Amino acid sequence: MRNLIDILDLSTDEINQLISTACDIIENPNKYAEKCKRKKLATLFFEPSTRTRLSFEAAMYELGGNVIGFSSSSSSSTAKGESVSDTIQVVSCYADIIAMRHPKEGAPMVASMVSSVPIINAGDGGHNHPTQTLADLLTIYREKGGFDNLTVGLCGDLKFGRTVHSLINALSRYSGIKFVLISPDELKLPDYVVNNVIIKNDIPYEETTDLISAMPNLDILYMTRVQKERFFNEQDYIRLKDSYILTPDKLENAKADLCIMHPLPRVNEISVAVDKDPRACYFKQVLNGKYMRMALILKLLEVS
């Protein structure tokens, strides 16, 4: 039985297989319409989510399966004091596969140790978000045709952004990758990610606080929100926040085939005026996430 807790649980060959399946789903949706008939997905979301939870539910329904679960811990027995371990063992009796989001890092790993059905980590604190990374990878594949020889700009909150950490882990296994890390000093990529992933894999990278100067070299721009609550000094936030709002004028020197991505939700870090730019791919990411979750469910349930 396989689980997906961390994106590195999947080899690059397995990621390529998931992408191939997702592309086939896009081309031949009717072929997959009953692949999971009489199968049940449990969505256990101990913290709020819109895209991820609905994406999993849409994925399972489009495979012909059913969905059970809850969308907040207050509507589950954890509000009565039940442990995560007990909740998982109970739900394992009702479902064939579980997608789980939890505010505590490592909770999905604990769940996988007691579950009798596959566990998918749908986000654990600031740690991992592997299925968002699968959505990101399919988006890059469909826009760029592959993952090699790309200069990837990561902008905004690189310190606490679990989507950024997972994507760096995933892309570090491909050749010719270069990272440009664009953030205020207060929100730089953690040293453990820089040292254990980027430097360990001998990947070229640069750190900068200037989005505009970095723009001309980028093939991918992955935006995240600069969060006011992460700053100790409000004056620093006010000084820096507008530097990381993407507007059409900041794209004047960008490549014609730049791929602009964002894990969403956005607040104001990408102007709505950018939505009309053909390089904006963040809503495509949402759709790609559904297809990759469909492919992942099929893989973990061993449905051919």
Image (cartoon, rainbow, N blue to C red):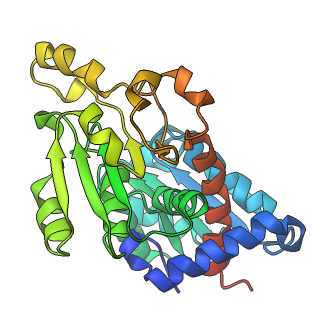
Left or right side of 294 for 207? left
Q: Residue furthest right?
A: 30
- Say which residue appears at 51% left-offset and 76% top-offset: 15
Instruction: Report x, y in % for residue 263.
Output: 47, 44
- Say which residue appears at 17% left-offset and 35% top-offset: 209
Tell me if I can see residue 147 in this picture.
yes
Relative to residue 276, is residue 109 depicted above or below? Answer: below
Tell me if I can see residue 53 in this picture.
no
Instruction: Report x, y in % for residue 150.
Output: 38, 62
- Say which residue appears at 52% left-offset and 41% top-offset: 49
- Say which residue appears at 40% left-offset and 26% top-offset: 269
Rendered-image quadrant of the C terminus? bottom right
Image quadrant assignment for residue 299: bottom right
- Disc tally is 0
Residue in the foreground of this view, choosing between 279 and 85: 279
Residue in the foreground of this view, choosing between 243 and 44: 243
Image quadrant assignment for residue 66: bottom right
Left or right side of 287 for 120? left
Residue in the foreground of this view, choosing between 215 and 129: 215
Relative to residue 229, is residue 295 depicted above or below? Answer: below
Instruction: Report x, y in % for residue 159.
Output: 21, 45
Left or right side of 285 for 108? left
Residue in the foreground of this view, choosing between 289 and 38: 289
Instruction: Report x, y in % for residue 214.
Output: 27, 41
Relative to residue 279, is residue 84 depicted above or below? Answer: below
